[in-house]
Amino acid sequence: MESPVVTIAEGKLRGNQRTNLDGEAFYAFLGIPYGKPPVGNLRFKAPEPAEQWTGIRDATKQGSCSIHCSEITRKVDGAEDCLNLNVFSKQLPSEDSSLKPVMIWIHGGGFIIGSNNVQHYGPEHLMLEDIVLVTINYRLGFLGFLKVDDPSLEIPNNAGICDQRLAMQWVQKNIKYFNGDPNNVTIFGESAGGMSVHFHVLSQASKGLFHKAIMQSGCLFTKLESQSVVVKMAQLINKNAKTEREALEVLRKVPEEKFFELQTKFLEKFPRNKPFLVWEESSSTQTIPVEQKILSEQYNKVPLLAGFTNNEGILEDILYTTNVIGSGWEYFFEFSRSVGLKEDHPKRQIILDKLSKFYSQGKYASEKYMWTTDSLFIIPTVITSKLHAKTSSEPVYLYNMSLDAGLNFWKKLFDKNHYSGASHCDELGYLFNTAFAAHKLHKGQLEISAIRRFVKLWTNFAKYGNPTPTGNDLNITWKPVDKNEVHYLDIGEELVPCTNPIPDRFKVWSEVLELINASS
């Protein structure tokens, strides 16, 4: 397998080859620009497509990610010029080849950290299967999620989401040159990536750009809010900035290397004003709530796969004890925001007392982070799956990862093995090959089997819209959620089909949500 050269709409690319978990070769093309550098007057703006180039572009080295403080190295990494993606394919087009299913990975990180770095999201596991994998970078922090209220300024609330959409448009235009099928595209992501996927499912602007969707530990029912901070941020530099227009002029003049310093300083001073995704679809008078949007049935109805790990909340301990993300993240786990309770809600204290009593008694008293696990991840995901199953003719598959083994990435990386179960992010070590902290990871027979199961389920879904199609070699049937019963698959040391996750906990949360809705 020689160094491949591929011609796409923008020009020629030279890639290289890598080998998958079984030692089989596949092609890799790294750092492909899909958008113009969002710098200068394009800072904060919606992205524009990449321009053409002459000659053969080197696609053997990673492109820059969006500037952030790495949760792994704890060093500032990246650049403002970050609109690039990676493509991996087992075979390039030929007379006897057929186009393969495409999977587009959207990384997580709370919209403030993360990248498509192959050291973190190595393709060697997923490339066991005959798919085409695309991993993307998008703008993070205030570069990608600066909320601006004045529509005349033409600043999208979610430039980072616009970046993702432009990357999906690039796939529609170019993926056939890598042997990918533009008519069979699955978007998948974890945490903030899962929320991004849900955004595209609900957004008419993303219609036709994908055909299936996977939401891992993230959906839009995780209620966090953003507000316009552009003036407040600019005033750290220039006290005379009084309007959003004036503030944008100030912020656009901040050199790239100083912008992240400004963002860090701002979040230290105003930790509750962190950049975040804004659900923004509106009627003529008001923003349409996520639940109302789903119930309206006016969204992109595609097969869905969603799920969570059984002890997501271990992440809270990791963030607090390592401070890997910074003080701007600490309020992320305030319970009131996760269920939409404002401080002046008339039944706020009643609800808090009810849940506090439930989680402090019996078997949950020793489960330190189960409250966080449920409020931010499990309950929103189950609600989401039930609503979509109610309103769509396409199947909705739900999973619970309970596997606690040697590739549970975040538990191993941050030495949290004394907690039982799977942490937030722990499934990533089975879908992707990670080189970070490899000395702490163990890849024995159980882990190899788990990799193959995860990869088979995810790629089956991408190929067929069903993770366990008839005749599958996993010898199970994963039933979709239906209107009467919440079917799900427990992914542990074995694959076990189940129904109705956390029934006792879901019961108390149903009571809580009734109290909230009754007072709304």
Image: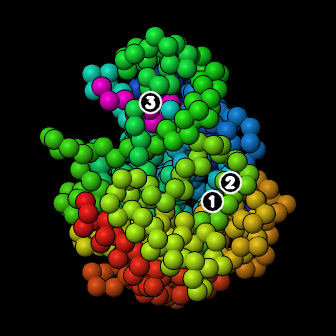
Residue picked out by circle 3: 229
Q: What is the spatial separation of the Cα atoms under label 1 and label 2, in whole angstroms?
A: 6 Å
Question: In what element is the residue under mark 1?
Answer: helix
For residue 316, the mark is: 1
Please check the rendered image and state whether residue 486 is part of the magenta-colored stretch, yes or no: no
Question: In what element is the residue under mark 2?
Answer: helix
Q: What is the spatial separation of the Cα atoms under label 3 and label 1, in whole angstroms?
A: 26 Å
Residue 231 drawn above or below residue 320: above
The quarter of the displayed image where residue 337 is located: bottom left
Q: Do the numbered discs 3 and 1 sit on residues whose CB atoms are within 8 Å?
A: no
Name the amino acid type tagged 2. Tyr
Please report whichever mark, 2 or 3, sits nearer to the chain's N-terminal start.
3
Q: Do the numbered discs 1 and 2 sit on residues whose CB atoms are within 8 Å?
A: yes
Residue 119 drawn above or below residue 478: above
- Disc 3: CA contacts within 10 A as few (<14), some (14-19) or many (>=20): many
Residue 482 drawn above or below residue 78: below
Residue 259 drawn above or below residue 27: above
- Disc 2: CA contacts within 10 A as few (<14), some (14-19) or many (>=20): some
The magenta-colored residue range is 143-150
Name the amino acid type tagged 1. Glu
Q: Main secondary structure of the magenta part?
A: loop
Q: What is the spatial separation of the Cα atoms under label 2 and label 3, in whole angstroms?
A: 25 Å
Residue picked out by circle 2: 320
Question: In what element is the residue under mark 3?
Answer: loop
Is residue 97 visible in the rendered image? The answer is: no
Residue drawn at x 50%, y 13% is 239
Please report whichever mark, 3 or 1, sits nearer to the chain's N-terminal start.
3
Name the amino acid type tagged 3. Val
Asked whether 2 or 457 is in front, the reply is 457
Please check the rendered image and state whether residue 146 is part of the magenta-colored stretch, yes or no: yes
Q: Residue 326, how many percent across, how many down? A: 65, 43
> Relative to residue 447, is residue 104 drawn left or right?
left
